[in-house]
Amino acid sequence: MTKAYITTSIPYVNGNPHIGFALEIIQADVLARYYKSLSVKTFFLTGTDENAIKNAQKAQELGLDVKKMVDDYAKQFYDLKSVLNLSFDFFIRTSSPDHHLSAQKFWLLCQKDIYKKKYVGLYCSGCESFYKDGEFKDNICPNHKKPLETIEEENYFFALSRYQKQLFDIISKDKIQIEPQYRKTEILNFINQGLEDFSISRPADRAYNWGIDVPGDSSQKIYVWFDALINYVSGLGFGTESENFKTFWLDNNNKIHFIGKDIIKFHLIYWPAMLLSARLPLPNKVFVHGFLTVNRQKISKTLGNVISPYDLVYKYGTDAVRYYFLREIPTAEDGDFSWQRFNEIYKSELSNELGNLVVRVTTLAEKDSLEVEFSDKEYDFSLNGKDLSELVENFNYHQAMAEINAYIKELNKKIDTFQPWKKSSGERQKFLIDMLSHLHKLGFVLRPFLPDTAGKILKSVSGKISKAQALFPSIADNN
Ligand SMILES: [Zn+2]
């Protein structure tokens, strides 16, 4: 692999970030950091989806200027960069003039598949999407628990039906590789039910005049999903003279989208069809993660169980939060968050195992005035002969973390069994230098997962050794 392009979905900005999005962006960050650590030329994109009608709606309800409102929320998402220690290379905001221009250029490339017609359909304003009659039980949106509304208007349509056969072929032959595999079946079933042309514009007045003008028709705004999907190329400067678009989209066979399971239809049907229409290359992989629950309950404002990644990090620190999401949540499946479980993991695996290991080894090494220098030149991404690169490249982070955890436990056990403090100085020093080299390898492997902790470990086993600071100090458990 010589290049990698990694994206997250872009969240709506009518609220603050919650831990569900934190999970996705941490997952994507691991892969980006992994490639970067192997010197693979990597571009990691995230951003915010700002042109939704419901943003304009909410701003009106609150009596705010919509641009000001999206600016404020977008900042909350951008600031996750330092809070979660993310390595993204660009943050695309779909209200930016550059994105507007890209989206309009993209629209023009699809012109042969775009036509205008009067339309009556069932619509969920929460999803900003039309649905088929009978697609949901009692025509109630399962995401928003609201009945679909009947809406009649004249819109532009995209001739999705023309691409049905081609899309079936692409998905069934893994021309876009879908992980996990069973999501592929879901998409093929959906295609087999028949693809209908979909509406890709909204009357400007219903859209509160917010969003991107349809090229040549300012009475219509581009449908927010059509414009949002284009972020994956506008973020690379599509439609400008940017080299990034050429490097990471046109000439790159390792383009990977990270998305949640609720938006697979948009990413595996609409988006590929749009790219086919525009005669642009398709993404190579789409990784679909599950949803987070809190104490096994769906996260919802009504239940009052929304957790902010800011609060979590404030209490436990960035790497503890990254660790929990990567270790405790099966990467492709639904997973649960609970403060209790978080406390348990923090204490047992981070404080007592990892933190303790580093302190024990460096304390003993300091007493012996040891001085070491290790090189990572010969390292591969493995521990104890177990290859972790495959686990990472196949989106099995939780298994990679389990291997890492087992390795840490094993090192602690080695110290318990060997009891270096009882040995002659020669034997003890030989043992400690070996342990320091294991810590160095551990630090190397931890870099994509826990970048800050990895850096601290690597630093603590370089040069003249002194007792390391506690990596995960104890925290009062009051929640
Ligand atoms: Zn909905």
Image (cartoon, helix red, strand yellow):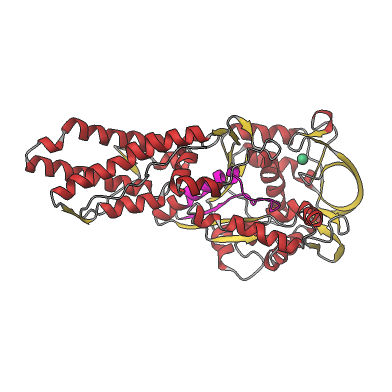
Q: Is residue 132 above or below residue 13?
A: above
Quarter for ligand 1? top right
* Front residue of 323 and 148: 323
Q: In this figure, what is the number of numbered marks?
A: 0
Location of residue 347 by image quarter: top left
State whether residue 330 appears in this view. no
Q: Which residues are magenta?
A: 3-32
Q: Judge left or right: residue 246 versus residue 122.
A: left
Residue 230 location (% of width, % of height): 68, 56
Q: Is residue 462 above or below residue 428?
A: below
Residue 317 location (% of width, % of height): 45, 48
Which residue is drawn at the image coordinates 36% and 36% (left, top)?
A: 405
State whether residue 315 appears in this view. yes
Residue 423 location (% of width, % of height): 9, 36
In the image, farthest residue toward the bottom: 241
Q: Judge left or right: residue 443 versus residue 168.
A: left
Location of residue 221 by image quarter: bottom right
Q: Is residue 315 above or below residue 96?
A: above
* Front residue of 338 and 245: 338
36 in magenta: no
30 in magenta: yes
* Front residue of 381 and 81: 81
Q: Judge left or right: residue 206 versus residue 88.
A: right
Which residue is drawn at the image coordinates 81% and 65% (left, top)?
A: 215
Residue 326 location (% of width, % of height): 47, 40
Q: Judge left or right: residue 1 versus residue 428.
A: right
* Front residue of 372 and 104: 372
